[in-house]
Amino acid sequence: MNRLKDKRALITGGTSGIGLETARLFLSEGARLAITGRNPATLEEARRSLGADVLIIPADASDVAAQKTVAETVRRVFGGLDVLFLNAGIADLRPVEQWDERGFDHSFATNVKGPYFLIQAMLPIFANPASVVLNASVNAHVGMPATSVYGATKAALLSLARTLSGELISRGIRVNAVSPGPISTPLYGKLGLSEADRKTLAASVQNQVPVGRFGDATEIAHAIVFLASDESAFTVGSELMIDGGMGNL
Ligand code: NAP
Protein backbone atom coordinates (compact mmCIF):
# COMPACT_ATOMS: atom_id res chain seq x y z
CA MET A 1 0.00 0.00 0.00
CA ASN A 2 1.33 3.41 -0.95
CA ARG A 3 -1.09 5.97 0.42
CA LEU A 4 1.79 7.89 2.02
CA LYS A 5 4.44 7.19 -0.60
CA ASP A 6 7.03 10.00 -0.76
CA LYS A 7 5.59 11.64 2.38
CA ARG A 8 8.03 12.70 5.07
CA ALA A 9 6.23 12.30 8.39
CA LEU A 10 6.91 13.09 12.03
CA ILE A 11 4.96 11.50 14.89
CA THR A 12 5.47 12.89 18.38
CA GLY A 13 5.24 10.22 21.06
CA GLY A 14 5.75 7.50 18.48
CA THR A 15 7.07 5.01 21.01
CA SER A 16 3.86 3.68 22.54
CA GLY A 17 0.13 3.17 22.08
CA ILE A 18 -1.58 5.20 19.34
CA GLY A 19 1.66 6.85 18.18
CA LEU A 20 3.51 3.54 17.79
CA GLU A 21 0.61 1.90 15.95
CA THR A 22 0.35 4.91 13.64
CA ALA A 23 4.11 4.70 13.05
CA ARG A 24 3.71 1.07 11.91
CA LEU A 25 0.87 1.96 9.57
CA PHE A 26 2.69 5.01 8.16
CA LEU A 27 5.66 2.77 7.31
CA SER A 28 3.43 0.17 5.67
CA GLU A 29 1.87 2.98 3.58
CA GLY A 30 5.31 4.02 2.31
CA ALA A 31 6.08 7.08 4.47
CA ARG A 32 9.56 8.17 5.45
CA LEU A 33 9.25 8.45 9.20
CA ALA A 34 10.64 10.26 12.22
CA ILE A 35 9.35 9.82 15.75
CA THR A 36 9.96 11.54 19.07
CA GLY A 37 9.74 10.26 22.61
CA ARG A 38 11.26 10.98 25.97
CA ASN A 39 11.96 7.69 27.67
CA PRO A 40 15.30 6.18 26.47
CA ALA A 41 14.09 2.60 27.03
CA THR A 42 10.91 2.95 24.94
CA LEU A 43 12.81 4.94 22.28
CA GLU A 44 15.25 2.02 21.97
CA GLU A 45 12.39 -0.49 21.86
CA ALA A 46 10.73 1.54 19.10
CA ARG A 47 13.99 1.62 17.15
CA ARG A 48 14.12 -2.16 17.31
CA SER A 49 10.48 -2.72 16.39
CA LEU A 50 10.18 -0.03 13.65
CA GLY A 51 13.56 -0.62 12.02
CA ALA A 52 16.74 1.28 11.37
CA ASP A 53 15.27 3.53 8.64
CA VAL A 54 13.15 5.43 11.16
CA LEU A 55 14.67 8.65 12.46
CA ILE A 56 14.46 8.59 16.26
CA ILE A 57 14.56 12.01 17.94
CA PRO A 58 14.68 12.09 21.74
CA ALA A 59 12.75 15.21 22.74
CA ASP A 60 10.56 16.31 25.62
CA ALA A 61 7.22 17.45 24.19
CA SER A 62 6.76 19.94 27.04
CA ASP A 63 10.00 21.80 26.31
CA VAL A 64 9.61 24.69 23.85
CA ALA A 65 13.35 24.93 23.07
CA ALA A 66 13.43 21.20 22.27
CA GLN A 67 10.78 21.71 19.59
CA LYS A 68 13.20 23.91 17.65
CA THR A 69 15.82 21.18 17.83
CA VAL A 70 13.29 18.63 16.54
CA ALA A 71 12.46 20.90 13.58
CA GLU A 72 16.15 21.46 12.85
CA THR A 73 16.85 17.70 12.92
CA VAL A 74 13.95 16.99 10.55
CA ARG A 75 15.12 19.77 8.21
CA ARG A 76 18.67 18.44 8.19
CA VAL A 77 17.75 14.80 7.58
CA PHE A 78 14.52 15.03 5.50
CA GLY A 79 14.88 18.50 3.96
CA GLY A 80 11.19 19.23 4.66
CA LEU A 81 8.03 17.79 6.20
CA ASP A 82 4.73 16.68 4.65
CA VAL A 83 2.92 15.21 7.67
CA LEU A 84 3.02 16.12 11.36
CA PHE A 85 1.04 13.99 13.82
CA LEU A 86 1.04 15.73 17.21
CA ASN A 87 0.28 12.77 19.39
CA ALA A 88 2.52 12.93 22.50
CA GLY A 89 0.39 13.66 25.51
CA ILE A 90 -0.27 12.83 29.13
CA ALA A 91 -3.48 12.14 31.01
CA ASP A 92 -3.16 13.44 34.55
CA LEU A 93 -6.56 12.82 36.10
CA ARG A 94 -7.48 14.35 39.48
CA PRO A 95 -10.53 15.84 41.18
CA VAL A 96 -10.45 19.64 41.03
CA GLU A 97 -9.46 20.07 44.70
CA GLN A 98 -6.30 17.99 44.18
CA TRP A 99 -4.78 20.17 41.47
CA ASP A 100 -1.77 22.43 41.99
CA GLU A 101 -0.15 24.96 39.69
CA ARG A 102 2.83 22.76 38.84
CA GLY A 103 0.73 19.82 37.64
CA PHE A 104 -1.62 22.11 35.75
CA ASP A 105 1.29 23.80 33.97
CA HIS A 106 2.89 20.44 33.15
CA SER A 107 -0.30 19.12 31.53
CA PHE A 108 -0.70 22.27 29.44
CA ALA A 109 3.02 22.38 28.54
CA THR A 110 2.97 18.77 27.30
CA ASN A 111 -0.43 18.67 25.63
CA VAL A 112 -0.78 22.23 24.28
CA LYS A 113 2.25 24.51 24.55
CA GLY A 114 4.87 22.08 23.17
CA PRO A 115 2.67 21.02 20.22
CA TYR A 116 1.86 24.66 19.44
CA PHE A 117 5.51 25.67 19.32
CA LEU A 118 6.43 22.57 17.33
CA ILE A 119 3.97 23.67 14.63
CA GLN A 120 5.55 27.12 14.74
CA ALA A 121 9.07 25.66 14.47
CA MET A 122 8.02 23.52 11.50
CA LEU A 123 6.54 26.41 9.48
CA PRO A 124 9.74 27.09 7.49
CA ILE A 125 10.02 23.46 6.43
CA PHE A 126 6.43 22.41 5.80
CA ALA A 127 5.88 21.31 2.22
CA ASN A 128 2.93 22.56 0.20
CA PRO A 129 0.66 20.64 0.61
CA ALA A 130 1.21 19.54 4.20
CA SER A 131 -1.04 17.91 6.79
CA VAL A 132 -1.02 18.44 10.55
CA VAL A 133 -3.11 16.14 12.75
CA LEU A 134 -3.71 16.88 16.43
CA ASN A 135 -4.57 14.07 18.83
CA ALA A 136 -7.37 15.47 21.00
CA SER A 137 -9.88 13.35 22.95
CA VAL A 138 -13.54 12.64 23.57
CA ASN A 139 -12.78 14.17 26.98
CA ALA A 140 -12.97 17.58 25.33
CA HIS A 141 -16.71 16.90 24.95
CA VAL A 142 -17.93 14.83 27.88
CA GLY A 143 -18.03 15.93 31.51
CA MET A 144 -16.14 13.00 33.00
CA PRO A 145 -15.09 13.53 36.65
CA ALA A 146 -11.34 14.12 37.24
CA THR A 147 -10.74 15.23 33.64
CA SER A 148 -11.09 19.02 34.07
CA VAL A 149 -7.48 19.81 33.15
CA TYR A 150 -6.98 16.97 30.65
CA GLY A 151 -10.26 17.84 28.91
CA ALA A 152 -9.29 21.53 28.77
CA THR A 153 -5.95 20.71 27.10
CA LYS A 154 -7.76 18.63 24.48
CA ALA A 155 -10.42 21.30 23.90
CA ALA A 156 -7.54 23.74 23.27
CA LEU A 157 -6.23 21.44 20.53
CA LEU A 158 -9.65 21.37 18.85
CA SER A 159 -9.62 25.16 18.85
CA LEU A 160 -6.13 25.15 17.32
CA ALA A 161 -7.26 22.82 14.53
CA ARG A 162 -9.78 25.46 13.47
CA THR A 163 -7.83 28.69 14.04
CA LEU A 164 -4.54 27.45 12.62
CA SER A 165 -6.35 26.03 9.59
CA GLY A 166 -7.76 29.50 8.94
CA GLU A 167 -4.29 30.97 9.26
CA LEU A 168 -2.26 28.36 7.41
CA ILE A 169 -4.46 26.99 4.63
CA SER A 170 -3.21 29.68 2.23
CA ARG A 171 0.23 28.06 2.58
CA GLY A 172 -1.25 24.64 1.75
CA ILE A 173 -1.12 23.44 5.38
CA ARG A 174 -4.26 21.60 6.53
CA VAL A 175 -4.79 21.16 10.28
CA ASN A 176 -7.29 18.57 11.54
CA ALA A 177 -7.92 16.74 14.80
CA VAL A 178 -8.94 13.28 15.89
CA SER A 179 -10.81 12.73 19.14
CA PRO A 180 -10.38 9.15 20.28
CA GLY A 181 -12.65 7.61 22.86
CA PRO A 182 -11.11 5.16 25.33
CA ILE A 183 -8.39 3.19 23.52
CA SER A 184 -6.48 0.25 25.01
CA THR A 185 -2.93 1.60 25.35
CA PRO A 186 -0.23 1.77 28.06
CA LEU A 187 -1.66 5.19 29.04
CA TYR A 188 -3.98 3.57 31.59
CA GLY A 189 -0.99 2.04 33.38
CA LYS A 190 0.48 5.54 33.83
CA LEU A 191 -2.43 7.01 35.83
CA GLY A 192 -0.85 6.12 39.15
CA LEU A 193 -3.75 3.81 40.10
CA SER A 194 -3.63 0.45 41.83
CA GLU A 195 -4.54 -2.53 39.63
CA ALA A 196 -7.93 -2.77 41.37
CA ASP A 197 -8.69 0.96 40.86
CA ARG A 198 -7.54 0.76 37.24
CA LYS A 199 -9.96 -2.10 36.60
CA THR A 200 -12.81 -0.21 38.28
CA LEU A 201 -12.07 2.86 36.16
CA ALA A 202 -11.87 0.77 32.97
CA ALA A 203 -15.22 -0.90 33.70
CA SER A 204 -16.89 2.43 34.43
CA VAL A 205 -15.45 4.04 31.28
CA GLN A 206 -16.44 1.05 29.15
CA ASN A 207 -20.04 1.37 30.41
CA GLN A 208 -20.13 4.85 28.89
CA VAL A 209 -19.17 3.64 25.41
CA PRO A 210 -22.25 2.79 23.32
CA VAL A 211 -20.40 0.07 21.37
CA GLY A 212 -19.51 -1.54 24.71
CA ARG A 213 -15.75 -1.82 24.45
CA PHE A 214 -12.46 0.06 24.38
CA GLY A 215 -11.13 0.91 20.94
CA ASP A 216 -7.94 -0.44 19.48
CA ALA A 217 -4.99 1.83 18.55
CA THR A 218 -5.24 0.64 14.92
CA GLU A 219 -8.75 2.08 14.73
CA ILE A 220 -7.23 5.52 15.36
CA ALA A 221 -4.15 4.92 13.19
CA HIS A 222 -6.31 4.24 10.11
CA ALA A 223 -7.99 7.63 10.55
CA ILE A 224 -4.61 9.35 10.90
CA VAL A 225 -3.46 7.79 7.62
CA PHE A 226 -6.56 9.22 5.94
CA LEU A 227 -5.99 12.71 7.39
CA ALA A 228 -2.27 12.56 6.57
CA SER A 229 -2.80 11.49 2.98
CA ASP A 230 -3.99 13.47 -0.04
CA GLU A 231 -7.28 11.52 0.15
CA SER A 232 -8.35 14.13 2.71
CA ALA A 233 -7.27 17.16 0.65
CA PHE A 234 -10.73 18.75 1.14
CA THR A 235 -10.78 18.09 4.93
CA VAL A 236 -9.66 21.23 6.74
CA GLY A 237 -10.08 22.35 10.37
CA SER A 238 -12.22 19.32 11.14
CA GLU A 239 -12.51 16.90 14.04
CA LEU A 240 -12.94 13.19 13.50
CA MET A 241 -14.49 11.55 16.56
CA ILE A 242 -13.53 7.88 16.86
CA ASP A 243 -15.09 7.00 20.15
CA GLY A 244 -17.60 4.17 19.80
CA GLY A 245 -20.34 6.80 20.03
CA MET A 246 -19.29 8.04 23.48
CA GLY A 247 -19.32 11.75 22.68
CA ASN A 248 -22.39 11.81 20.46
CA LEU A 249 -24.99 9.32 21.64
P1 NAP B 1 0.76 6.20 25.68
O1 NAP B 1 0.74 4.78 25.26
O2 NAP B 1 1.06 6.56 27.07
O3 NAP B 1 1.72 6.99 24.68
C1 NAP B 1 2.03 8.34 24.92
C2 NAP B 1 3.19 8.71 24.03
O4 NAP B 1 3.47 10.11 24.26
C3 NAP B 1 4.46 7.94 24.37
O5 NAP B 1 5.19 7.71 23.20
C4 NAP B 1 5.20 8.91 25.29
O6 NAP B 1 6.62 8.76 25.22
C5 NAP B 1 4.83 10.23 24.66
N1 NAP B 1 5.01 11.33 25.60
C6 NAP B 1 4.30 11.62 26.70
N2 NAP B 1 4.81 12.70 27.31
C7 NAP B 1 5.86 13.09 26.55
C8 NAP B 1 6.80 14.14 26.65
N3 NAP B 1 6.78 15.05 27.64
N4 NAP B 1 7.76 14.22 25.69
C9 NAP B 1 7.83 13.33 24.68
N5 NAP B 1 6.97 12.32 24.54
C10 NAP B 1 6.00 12.20 25.47
O7 NAP B 1 -0.68 6.86 25.42
P2 NAP B 1 -1.72 6.81 24.20
O8 NAP B 1 -2.97 6.32 24.76
O9 NAP B 1 -1.14 6.20 22.99
O10 NAP B 1 -1.89 8.39 23.99
C11 NAP B 1 -1.42 9.09 22.86
C12 NAP B 1 -2.26 10.34 22.71
O11 NAP B 1 -3.64 9.96 22.54
C13 NAP B 1 -2.24 11.28 23.92
O12 NAP B 1 -2.18 12.61 23.46
C14 NAP B 1 -3.57 10.99 24.59
O13 NAP B 1 -4.04 12.10 25.33
C15 NAP B 1 -4.44 10.71 23.40
N6 NAP B 1 -5.66 9.95 23.73
C16 NAP B 1 -5.57 8.70 24.27
C17 NAP B 1 -6.73 8.02 24.57
C18 NAP B 1 -6.73 6.65 25.20
O14 NAP B 1 -7.78 6.21 25.68
N7 NAP B 1 -5.63 5.93 25.21
C19 NAP B 1 -7.98 8.61 24.32
C20 NAP B 1 -8.02 9.88 23.75
C21 NAP B 1 -6.85 10.54 23.45
P3 NAP B 1 7.46 8.31 26.52
O15 NAP B 1 7.11 6.87 26.74
O16 NAP B 1 8.86 8.54 26.10
O17 NAP B 1 7.00 9.20 27.64
Image (cartoon, rainbow, N blue to C red):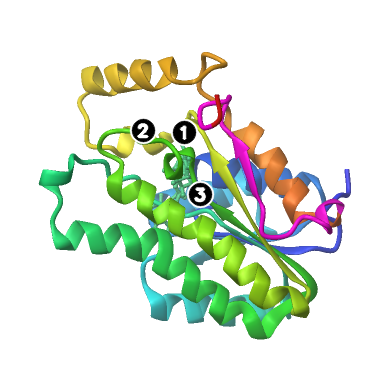
Q: What x and y, as percent, mark residue 144?
A: 33, 33
> Residue lying furthest bottom in this view?
124
Q: CA distance from mark 1 to mark 3?
A: 15 Å
Res. 27 visible in picture? no
Residue drawn at point x = 49 percent, y = 20 percent: 209
**Secondary element at image label 2:** helix
In the image, 194 versus 236, the foreground residue is 236
Label 2, on which residue? Answer: 188
Q: Which residue is mark 1?
A: 185
Amino acid identity at mark 1: Thr
Residue 244 % position (x, y): 58, 25
Residue at x-position 44% and y-position 52%: 154
- Seen in the picture, residue 64 relative to 56 is either above or below; the reply is below
Q: Quadrant of the C terminus?
A: top right
Badge 3 element: loop
- Specify which label sits upstream in the sequence, 3 or 2: 3
Mark 3 Cα within 10 Å, few/some/many (few <14, many 20+)?
many
Separation of residues labelled 3 and 2 (CA atoms): 16 Å
The residue segment tinted magenta is 231-247
Mark 1 or 3: in front is: 3
Residue 228 in the image: above or below residue 18: below
Q: Which mark is residue 136?
A: 3
Residue at left offset 49%, top offset 58%? 157
Q: For the residue marked with disc 3, what is the amino acid?
A: Ala
> Label 2 is placed on what type of residue?
Tyr
